[in-house]
Image (tube, grey):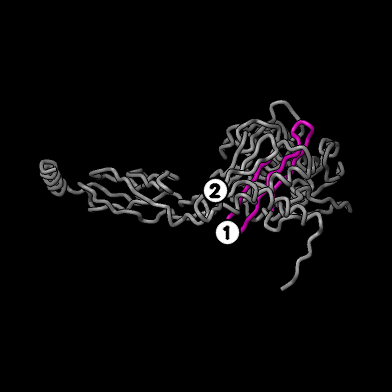
């Protein structure tokens, strides 16, 4: 077994995180108790299970804040969407405008009048946080950065980012340019879910273009092998921000911290959240979409029963070692009568943990059941009549 040597700085960092967690409270996940979440020094923050979408920890997660270069997550998402749709390819060469070339702040150092591939520009956006690369791609996709901002806002609404509004593709400070920790977690989840073929970009530690090598500013990529994304941001107004994601033992977490006071602080506070989530929670994958959960009787139907199940997978985030305490119950509408339509709700699945409801999902028909013929319907009416008398 190969021995791994850690720098003194990395050792001190890990010791700090462990001590922070150990001092939370004298409780353990093993006995079903969860300590309070760590104190996080940020204006807004959130920890989410990427599979379930369940929020584990949050503070000021709905507060509208300037996102700085976290904006570029949406820029990259839209470019990846265009590639997936076949509208552009990674090999296409993008003309570099004067506007893109003149952008200040973090840059990829592209030159006006040249052409750069979509693939390289996407790396410049994600790894180097290049404002010039972001503008170049925005102009190529939508014709102008202003038109691209419209696409960004349309996509935000489509994803359910209800407290977000973009004015540009870079995160350059602008009035009416804002988002929230919760909305950024939604966006990060969409990036991971929708375009896995491009997600490895977010884990790359450096990128060299035109002889200039720049490093990814996400310090967690060097400190924690489980971390594989996503994006940093910083302006004077926004402070130091980080959206990070990590995966351990099949569980993926997304942490968002906004408005910390230094590059080191955003990494440290993000690590607190990730460590807390992995230590005390786990992802539980229950029933799958389309699984038959019950087959209640159907009256006046061409079939005597109907299969009921879930439209989507049941995925929950629960305290570690508590899965055997989960209980599921079903409530089904009485006296189901044809016609039954596939996809319509005819009951409810309720999941509880320690007598507390942790999930409710609609039970839907997995098939159609048409009405029976005339005489079969008459017979069922008679049966129901006498059933009603005796009940």
Give the percent coordinates (x, y) of residue 225.
70, 58
Quadrant of residue 133 within the rendered picture: top right
Secondary structure of the residue carrying tag 2 is loop
Can residue 93 be seen at all in this image of the molecule? no
Residue pictured at 29% horizontal, 52% vertical: 306
Residue pictured at 57% horizontal, 52% vertical: 280
For discs 2 and 1, the disc positioned in front in the rendered view? 2
Q: Which residue is mark 2?
A: 34
- What's the distance in space between the residues labelled 2 and 1, CA to CA? 21 Å
Q: Which residue is mark 1?
A: 250
Of helix, strand and loop, which mostly describes the magenta segment?
strand
Give the residues in magenta: 228-257
Above or below, 233 relative to 212: above
Relative to 137, 342 lies left or right: left
Give the percent coordinates (x, y) of residue 111.
87, 44
N-term mark: 2 or 1: 2
Report the quarter where the C terminus lies.
top left
């Amino acid at each position: 077994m190969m021995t791994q040597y850690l720098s003194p700085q990395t050792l001190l960092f890990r010791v700090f995180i462990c001590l922070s967690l150990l001092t939370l409270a004298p409780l353990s996940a093993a006995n079903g108790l969860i300590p309070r979440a760590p104190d996080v020094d940020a204006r807004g923050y959130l920890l989410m299970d990427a599979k379930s979408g369940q929020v584990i920890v949050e503070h000021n997660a709905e507060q509208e804040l300037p996102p700085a270069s976290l904006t570029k997550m949406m820029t990259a998402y839209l470019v990846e969407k265009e590639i997936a749709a076949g509208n552009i390819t990674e090999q296409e060469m993008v003309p570099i405008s004067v506007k893109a070339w003149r952008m200040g702040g973090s840059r990829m150092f592209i030159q006006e009048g040249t052409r750069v591939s979509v693939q390289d520009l996407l790396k410049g956006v994600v790894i180097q946080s290049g404002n010039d690369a972001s503008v170049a791609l925005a102009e190529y996709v939508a014709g102008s950065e202003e038109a691209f901002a419209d696409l960004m806002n349309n996509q935000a609404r489509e994803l359910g980012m209800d407290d977000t509004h973009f004015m540009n593709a870079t995160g350059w400070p602008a009035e009416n340019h804002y988002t929230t920790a919760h909305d950024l977690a939604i966006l990060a989840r969409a990036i991971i879910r929708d375009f896995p073929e491009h997600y490895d970009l977010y884990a790359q530690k450096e990128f060299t273009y035109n002889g200039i090598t720049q490093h990814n500013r996400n310090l967690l990529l060097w400190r924690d092998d489980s971390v594989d994304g996503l994006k940093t941001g910083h302006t004077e107004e926004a402070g130091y921000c980080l959206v990070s994601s990590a995966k351990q033992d099949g569980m993926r977490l997304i942490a968002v911290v906004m408005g910390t006071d230094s590059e080191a602080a955003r990494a440290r506070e993000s690590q607190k959240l990730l460590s807390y989530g992995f230590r005390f929670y786990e992802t539980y994958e229950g029933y799958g979409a389309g699984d038959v959960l019950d087959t209640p009787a159907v009256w006046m139907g061409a079939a005597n029963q109907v299969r009921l199940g879930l439209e989507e997978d049941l995925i929950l985030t629960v305290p570690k070692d508590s899965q055997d305490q989960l209980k599921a119950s079903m409530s089904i509408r009485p006296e189901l009568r044809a016609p039954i339509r596939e996809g319509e709700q005819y009951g409810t699945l309720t999941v509880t943990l320690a007598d507390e409801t942790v999930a409710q999902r609609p039970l839907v028909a997995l098939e159609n059941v048409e009405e029976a013929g005339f005489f079969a319907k008459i017979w069922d009416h008679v049966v129901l009549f006498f059933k009603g008398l005796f009940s």
